[in-house]
Amino acid sequence: MALFLLIMLIILLVVGFPMFMVMLLPTVSAMPIYLSNAPLFVLVQRTIAGISPFPLVAVPLFIFAADIMVKGEMAKRLTDLAEALVGHLPGGLAHTTTLSCMIFGAVSGSTQAAVAAIGTTMHPWLIKHGYHQSFATALIINASDVAQLIPPSIFMIVFGVISGASVAALFMAGLVPGILLGLSFMAYSWFYARKYKIPRMKRASRGEIWKAIKRASGPLGFVVIIIGGIYSGFFSPTEASGVAVAYALVLEVCFYRSIKVGEIPRVALTSGITHGMIFILIGGATAFIWLLTIARIPYMAAQFIASVNPSPLGLLFIINGIFFIALM
């Protein structure tokens, strides 16, 4: 039966079914075998239970805060600061893109928001200044993924809820790898710019750097308040998401005046569509995991690994191999 579930999962993925259906259809198909007397509404209960934990409240709120920033001026101010700091280096525009995505990830925690906010501005600039279109696209997409590591990360909130791990501990664990990953992108961009002789940008003066810092003080204060508040224990990641929304609204509506009050419901609707897609995936994954547990598949996998008796490093390779195949 485990083989049947795996084959069905692969077929649905190859055919191109939506991801939540890829997880729910095998679950529905296997229920009569493992739970012949259970009514179908048990599956509905399990799906809803997956999106019920209180910490998941942080997901729609962080997405809402990120969409407010995309609609307003905060993303532009962060990009201007990154350009003033690293724009003069070889590959400066690529460095600006990477650093902007890293800072925006630390502000919003959303990969999609980073792509929308930074990508729409930087992609045409990268191409205009001599970068190949494929490089520009790949850089923006991959640099935006750094937001999954740098706190507050929506991905880590979801993982923490599903796995039972501490969200604050996950945030601390992701900070250094996120910074190192961003620096690796910048190192590659430096070699790329040297190889293809990309023209360097003008070095910003001290006055221009100071002006960019002052203009970005609001978004940078966001990082200090949210991350500092979580790490100091002043508020939880869930409470931090509410603070993020309030802070973003105050900045964009009251100080920058880049968003009108009448535009807020439209931004909220966009956020609702995004987090609705995330929640249906979480619900489907929860139901699928529940069925795998009943089918004793995790137990059988653990027995197989124990019989192989790999070294700690070998076990790490096996786990990463499973993740690599599952996420292809």
Image (cartoon, rainbow, N blue to C red):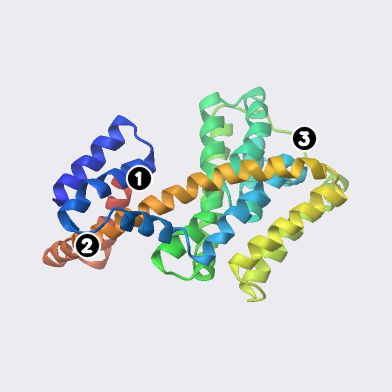
Identify the residue under disc 3.
Answer: 202
Residue pushed farthest left? 307
Between 85 and 247, which is closer to the camera in this rendering? 247
Query: Which comes sooner in the sequence, label 2 or label 3?
Result: 3
Q: Amino acid at mark 2?
A: Ile
Between 238 and 180, which is closer to the camera in this rendering? 238
Q: Disc 1 and disc 3: Cα gap in Å? A: 41 Å
Q: Amino acid at mark 1?
A: Leu
Q: Residue at x 42, y 69 (%)?
A: 164
Say what secondary structure mark 3 lies in.
Answer: loop
Q: Position of residue 322 (x, y in %)?
A: 27, 52
Q: Crowding at label 3, few (<14), some or many (≥20) Cα neighbours within 10 Å? A: few
Relative to 72, say whether 50 is above or below.
Answer: below
Identify the residue under disc 2.
Answer: 294
- Is 111 positioned to the left or the right of 8 in the image? right
Quadrant of the frame with the C terminus: top left
Residues under numbered marks 1 and 3 in contact, where contact means CB atoms less than 8 Å apart: no
Identify the residue under disc 1.
Answer: 327
Q: Residue at x 26, y 48 (%)?
A: 28
